[in-house]
Amino acid sequence: MSKLSSLEKNLDQSCSYREWMETAPALDEFEDKDRWRMGPESGDFDHCALQDQERILSVRHKAGFSATMAKSDAVTLIQRFGAHLISTFISIFCS
């Protein structure tokens, strides 16, 4: 079995996120698809939106949920990225 096949098999048979994360970086590196780790910019997605979401989740985790904080973050995201984020924001913070 080739290294590529072995890595793909390990990834497919992962039973947890942790197991998947043990294999995914090695597969990315083997396939020379790990350049994205060097910087967040991409034409394929809005890296600013992802960084904002990561910041919101981090603050929520560290400080606990706060309705005031959630409203402020929601307003910022909606102003910046439009209405389609409303449903995502609500599903993350109000579930």
Image (cartoon, helix red, strand yellow):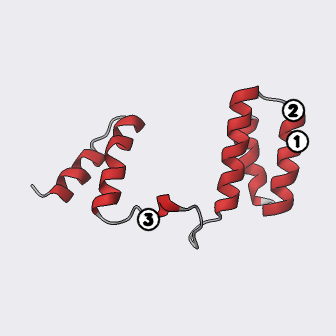
The numbered mark at residue 35 is 3
The C terminus: image quadrant: top right
State the image quarter where residue 20 is shown: top left
Check disc 2 and give the amino acid type. Ala
47 relative to 51, above or below: below
The residue indicated by pointer 2 is 67
Q: Using the numbered discs, state the Cα–Cα distance from disc 1 to disc 3 in whole angstroms.
A: 36 Å
- Dot 3, how many residues are within 10 Å of its Cα: few (below 14), some (14-19), or many (20+)? few
Q: CA distance from mark 2 to mark 3?
A: 38 Å
- Closer to the eye: label 2 or 3: 3
Picture coordinates of residue 68, whole percent (x, y):
90, 35
Q: Amino acid at mark 3?
A: Arg
**What is the C-alpha distance between the residues marked 1 and 2?**
6 Å
10 Å crowding of disc 2: few (<14), some (14-19), many (20+)? few
The residue located at (65%, 54%) in the rendering is 50
Q: Amino acid at mark 1?
A: Lys
Q: Which residue is mark 1?
A: 71
Q: Secondary structure at mark 3?
A: helix
User: Contact (CB < 8 A) between labels 1 and 2?
Assistant: yes
